[in-house]
Amino acid sequence: MTRDSKINKRLVALFLLGCVLLNFPIISLFNLEILIFGLPLLYVYIFIIWCLIIGLTALATLFHSRERADDSGDTGGR
Amino acid sequence: MLLTGNILFFSFGYVGLLFVIAYYGDKRADAGRSIISNPYIYALSLAVYCTAWTFYGSVGLASRSGLSFLTIYLGPTLMVTLGWVVMRKIIRISKVHRITSIADFIASRYGKSPTLGGVVTIIAVAGVIPYIAVQIKAISGTFFLINQYPEISVTSTFADIPLLGDTAFYVALMLAVFAIFFGTRHLDAAERHEGLVAAIAFESIIKLVAFLAVGLFVTYGLYNGFADLFEKAHRFSDLKRALTIESSQQSNPFFEELLTINAGGFTYIDWGMHIFLSMMAILLLPRQFQVVVVENVNEEHLNKAIWLFPLYLLAINIFVLPVAFAGMMQFAAGSVDNDYFGLTLAMAAKQQFLTLFVCLGGVSAATGMVIVETIALSTMICNDLVMPVLLRLPIPAISRSSELTGLLLLIRRGSIILVLMLGYAYFHYLGGFYALVSIGLTSFAAVAQFAPALIGGIFWKGGTRSGAISGLIAGFVVLTYTIFLPSLVPIGLIHQDFVTGGPFGINLLKPYQLFGLQHFNPISHAAFWSMLVNVSVYITVSVLGRPRAIEHTQAALFVDVFKYSGETGDSLFRRGTVNLPDLRSLLSRFLGKTKADEALSGYAQKHNIDWDDQMTADADLVGHAEKLLTGAVGSASARIMVSSVVKEEPLGIEEVLNILDETRQVIAYSRELEKATAELKKANLRLKELDRLKDDFISTVTHELRTPLTAVKSLAEILYTNPNIDADRFENFTGIIIKESERLIRLVSQILDYEKIQSAKLDWVIASLDLKEVVKDAVISTQQLIHDKNIAIDMDLAENVPAVSGDRDRLIQVMVNLLSNAVKFCNTDRGMIVVRLRAVNDQLRVEVQDNGIGIKPEDQTRIFEPFLQIKNPTLGRPAGTGIGLTITKNIIDFHHGRIWVDSEPGKGTMFSFEIPANPEASGH
């Protein structure tokens, strides 16, 4: 259960981070009529944050499975 | 190539392919070799979320209000990061309770309430039918466009097309056939459809690849990449602006505006509300519940799916904006429907293959949604709307019928056709009035009404049935007022004044600006008010009301599912008995005879029951049967059915539980309490025993201390009062005083040792020792004692024994204890003590044997317990303090050794102990 509560905490934190980064007022900071590399700023910003969330979620679950594999290696199963 | 005949051929070919995949999936599932049991297929099946709305509607929305289309995908991305917390809990609960739809879930949580299940079903059907209509519209629009190839025209309204000449009608029929074939082939207790999921996953691949293909073609074929496309769009926009300065309201907004959130009157509030709605939708849409929860093979699949699914969403959205911009640049405003830019761009470029592929992608997106949604809805309609009513009506045909599986399948098939026909009718008569997106969002807002009841229900035990029902109804009423009623205005059913001036001219009640609320678009506005009312009513009614017993039980089972996994707790509130034949016939009515027999014999095997011996089913079996029925007909109906055969005991269990109502925790945790109580009882007994021993000990010790003290005191007094006592008597008296004082000291130090060992405060000095020397030293120090009683001692010590590591003083103490014990129980003059030392395997064994009075067998096991003194029948009172052997045992334990006793009353006693030779350096 401790492993589970650990990943739970990480993912909830990630959820809150995503909610903050993708909502007012943070998003208004990028809501400008600017092109970077020829692409609109807000468009680029949202996709970067999106990738970030996906990447971090994948990492969190990866760590979770690893830790669990280690666990069962040590104690012969949960 | 793209003649009507060919298109039809491809379309039917494609549907045929789906049939093959689904059929193969089912076959493999029957053979026990599932093709969908992996996280990748699971993630793809979740992508049934992406419908024609995604495939076509996003582009249209992007061209009208810019980036706001992304909210629909950002919400689910955020929500599935919570998948491990929320979704896994829902999945676990559903598996434990055999829940097969969202209506069933909510009904089951609030005490298996048929009313609640019905309300949820009605809201779901009302909310989702327009959404199904959208899909039919998309399929129909696709065929309409591609049929004109290479001409490109605006899709018109469909109300004037005769029914039998409308492709969409046949499409709807074909979808119904598919859904019936793979969704209701047979009655499955788990309501899982492997073949269907395989087909859905395949469609998810097709729609993604198709959209990426057209996106790549537009971005890199028609333009030179993203930067070039945005550059051209930028210039085009400036040009437009220059051209439209005179013309007042141009329909095409400017590109800069599209790239920011404020486009098309879309505010940050709307942005946030849309993200919230889509977060709810990913859990609460009936089809999402079906694929996420019901069709889930293994909880662990969530592990990968929670990032694979967002990745899918991201991929399918990358090219939405480029396609929208390209479409706006290529086609004059209003010349084509913006929703279909993807298709029309491919057609305009005369890319026949691409056009066909995009067409298939669009059809995939739409059909996948329709099929899963209708199956999910049909389960709900059957289990939570029709069956509870049918089972309560006194219809002789039903109550007499021996097998109802046919009826169940019939109801479900009927529901599928009904839902599809309603969807088609909605599309045919009303669909032309609205864009894909606004209808979809209305559905989102409708299903979001389930959120308080469902999410509140799995995390908050206090939610009650009345709270859930009132919250749902209140929320839905508000939603109806703020979004459904105004949507009837364009059709002409309600007068325009209702929206612009409010009902009866009351401005405060304007449906789009309720109580004067500004800065919300209609959907956000409706979502805000309905959720506010829903949540408030749910909480208020729950807090004020008093839940029934079954609601308590279900609440505890749902909220603490990870604690109670594996038990349903049905046995907690069912105490009535059931005749086994009654139960058997009930099961076979709903599951079919073969399945019922299989289920019962499986249960018998698992619990080692012989049916021939039993005529009644116990509570556990009744609970099991109810679960089986829940899979087939839903929790509410299952409860009605089981109740009909249960003979409740005279005092209804409901009443009993109502009495216990206040202590619901006790009901739920009774098992743990029982365990804890048993442990407490044991501990209490042990404490009492220890207490008694301690009392004995204190009386013994005080006695032991007082005897020598009295002797010392009286002798000292004699010496004090008679200073002229003769030398012999003086020597004699002082000798006794010294001996008695030594005995006192020994006693006190034993008590101190014992206390130290018990509280682990003893300092141990560990060194390598020769045990032979230890034994010899101990014998020397007890020489006087042995000599006094004229006892013979024989030492039989092996030469060259290995060393041990240990505390020298403590080991001497052990030997002295054993020797003085032996002396104590030996007869004067005839006594004989043998001390032996041997190496046995890796151990050194020391034996101290005497020919004393011996120990009774029943006392032999207890002599090492603290404060135990063997009552000596001849002496009347015990000799010694009763802790010497306890200390001895503690010291031996510390040296990783063991000590035991062999004795025969009247013949003698032998104490033996072993300690390991040269054990590894001790870490103490």
Image (cartoon, coloured by chain):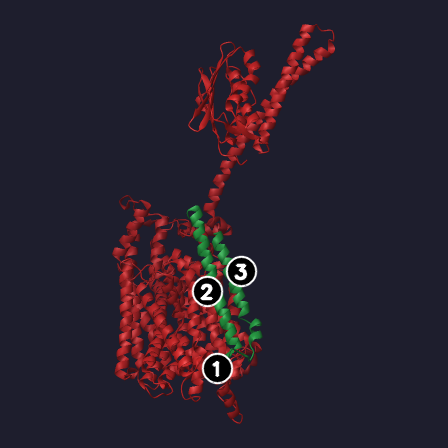
Chain colours: A green, B red
Residue receiving disc 2: B80
Image point 53% across, 69% down: which residue? B532
Label 2 – label 3 distance at C-alpha: 30 Å
The residue type indicated by label 2 comes to Val
Marks 3, 1 in one chain? yes
Check the image and report above or below for B534 versus B231: above
Q: Determine whether label 2 and label 3 are within 8 Å by CB.
A: no
Q: Position of residue B583 (x, y in %)?
A: 31, 53
Q: Nearer the viewer, residue A5 or B578?
A: A5
Residue B474 in sight here: no
State which chain disc 1 sits on.
B
Describe the element under mark 2 as helix, strand or loop: helix
Residue receiving disc 3: B543
Badge nearest the viewer, 3 or 1: 1
Image point 35% across, 68% down: which residue? B201
Marks 2, 1 in one chain? yes
Q: Residues within 10 Å of mark 1 (few under 14, many from 20)?
A: many
Label 2 – label 1 distance at C-alpha: 32 Å
Describe the element under mark 3 as helix, strand or loop: helix
Residue receiving disc 1: B230
